[in-house]
Amino acid sequence: MNEIFGQLGQLFFETVPTVVFVFFLFVLLDRMLFRPVQKVLKQREEATAGAQARARAMMAEAEAKRLDYERGLQAARQDLYRQREGERRAAVEERARALADSRHHAEAMLAEAKAALAQEVAWARTSLDSSCRQLAEFISEKLAGPEARAGGGPEA
């Protein structure tokens, strides 16, 4: 059994440098490779997470600006519709006023024309009466002959 312990001791003694070398290699790789790679990966993850957070914030800001723009656009459209409606109403009122003015003017012209026609009819009647009397006198003079002019006619 001593021999086994001796062999185990010798085996242990021979493996100690390998274990030390592996430990040294692990420490060296940890400091030279693993930690820098982990540091770079952590920085990349933080940068990615930060970029994603900034992107989300920018998207939220863009959405808020879009909503503001749409609200402003809707308000501008409503103002434009109100303005157009006001202009339309004013145009309708102006047209109604112009139509009423034209109607009053036409009625006044018609009244003037009727009055002028009535005057012309009265003048024509007066002229016709006068012409009729003159014609009647002329006809009666022609029919009665020269004795009617002298006053010796049947009436006398």
Image (cartoon, helix red, strand yellow):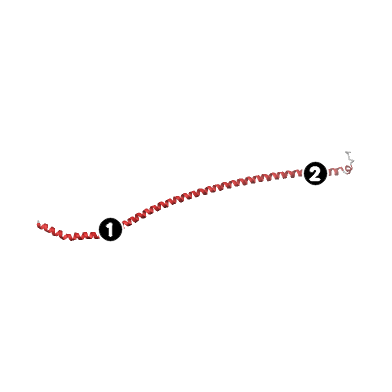
- In percent of the image, x 68 and y 45: which residue is there? 108
Task: Work out whether residue 115 or residue 71 is closer to the camera in this orientation and state it.
Answer: 71
Q: Position of residue 140 (x, y in %)?
A: 84, 42
- In percent of the image, x 17 and y 59: which residue is there? 16
Task: Work out whether residue 129 or residue 13 is closer to the camera in this orientation and state it.
Answer: 13
60 w.r.t. 150: above or below: below
Q: Position of residue 71 (x, y in %)?
A: 46, 49
Q: Secondary structure at mark 2?
A: helix
Q: Position of residue 3 (x, y in %)?
A: 10, 58
Q: Position of residue 70 (x, y in %)?
A: 46, 50
- Say which amino acid is labelled 1: Arg
Q: Quadrant of the N terminus?
A: bottom left
- In percent of the image, x 58 and y 47: which residue is there? 90
Position of 33 with respect to 148 (left or right) is left
Q: Are marks 1 and 2 in contact (CB under 8 Å)?
A: no
Position of 68 with respect to 141 (left or right) is left
Position of 111 with respect to 144 (left or right) is left
Reading the image, the residue beneath label 2 is 130
Residue 91's disc is none
Task: Work out whether residue 67 or residue 92 is closer to the camera in this orientation and state it.
Answer: 67
> From mark 1 to mark 2, how far is it between C-alphas?
138 Å
Task: Work out whether residue 22 or residue 143 is closer to the camera in this orientation and state it.
Answer: 22
Q: Secondary structure at mark 1?
A: helix
Residue 35's disc is 1
136 w.r.t. 44: above or below: above
Sequence order check, earlier mark of 1 and 2: 1
- In percent of the image, x 49 and y 48: which residue is there? 75
- Say which amino acid is labelled 2: Ser
